[in-house]
Image: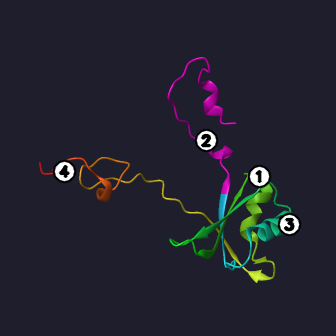
């Protein structure tokens, strides 16, 4: 449960957005070196045998839907989940586990200088930055 959400009264309808605390966030790890032919269920079963519980697995795909040799594993933030980065072998295959790197930056249009969209989709009038 997001503790920041507890402070908002449930009696009134208000627009709000909260962020989870760092201690409440899940661990997102990328496993490299997993062949595209290996199913997500097989990976999940192997990781559960090794003691990783409550995990969610996502296969990354290219633009045309072609599977890549990358799998994202989402685990709860517990001590056992921290040990996933020490794994070097999965189902007899050499793998490399890395922390997922997400860009948390919000895109900015170079046409209108507003945030949340790109120049190619911008329909606002251009804004000059000359002083």
Out of 84 and 35, give the one closest to the viewer.
35
- Answer whether residue 109 is magenta in the image: no
Q: Nearer the viewer, residue 111 or 65?
A: 65
Q: Which secondary structure is most common in the magenta stretch?
A: loop
Which numbered disc, 1 or 4, marks the residue that appears first in the sequence? Answer: 1
* Left or right of 120, for residue 81: right
Q: Earlier in the sequence, mark 1 or mark 2?
A: 2
Crowdedness near tag 4: few (<14), some (14–19) or many (≥20) residues, C-alpha within 10 Å = few
Which residue is tagged 1?
A: 78
Q: CA distance from mark 3 to mark 1?
A: 15 Å
Q: Position of residue 56 (x, y in %)?
A: 72, 58
Tag 4 and tag 2, C-beta contact below 8 Å: no
Q: Which residue is mark 2?
A: 20
Badge 3: how crowded within 10 Å, few (<14), some, or many (20+)? Answer: few
- Give the number of the mark in front: 3 or 4: 4
Disc 1 versus disc 4: nearer the observer: 4
- The residue at 58%/75% (across/down) is 66
What residue did someone put label 4 on?
126
Extreme-left residue of the structure: 131
Q: Position of residue 48 (x, y in %)?
A: 84, 63
Residue 7 in the image: state x and y as whole percent. Answer: 61, 25
Q: Which residue is mark 3?
A: 50
Whether residue 14 is in magenta: the answer is yes
Q: Report whether 104 appears left or right of 75.
A: left
Circle 4 SS class:
loop
| Residue interval drawn in magenta | 1-27
């Amino acid at each position: 449960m997001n503790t920041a959400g507890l402070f908002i009264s449930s009696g009134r309808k208000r627009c709000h957005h909260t962020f989870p605390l760092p201690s409440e966030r899940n661990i997102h790890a990328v496993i490299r070196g997993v062949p595209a032919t290996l199913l997500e269920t097989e990976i999940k079963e192997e990781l559960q045998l090794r003691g990783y519980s409550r995990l969610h697995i996502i296969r990354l795909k290219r633009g045309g839907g072609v599977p890549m040799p990358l799998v994202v594993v989402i685990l709860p933030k517990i001590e056992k989940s921290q040990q996933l980065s020490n794994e070097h072998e999965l189902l007899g295959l050499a793998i490399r586990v890395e922390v997922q790197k997400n860009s948390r930056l919000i895109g900015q249009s170079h046409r209108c200088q507003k945030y949340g969209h790109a120049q190619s989709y911008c329909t606002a009038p251009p804004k000059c930055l000359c002083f």
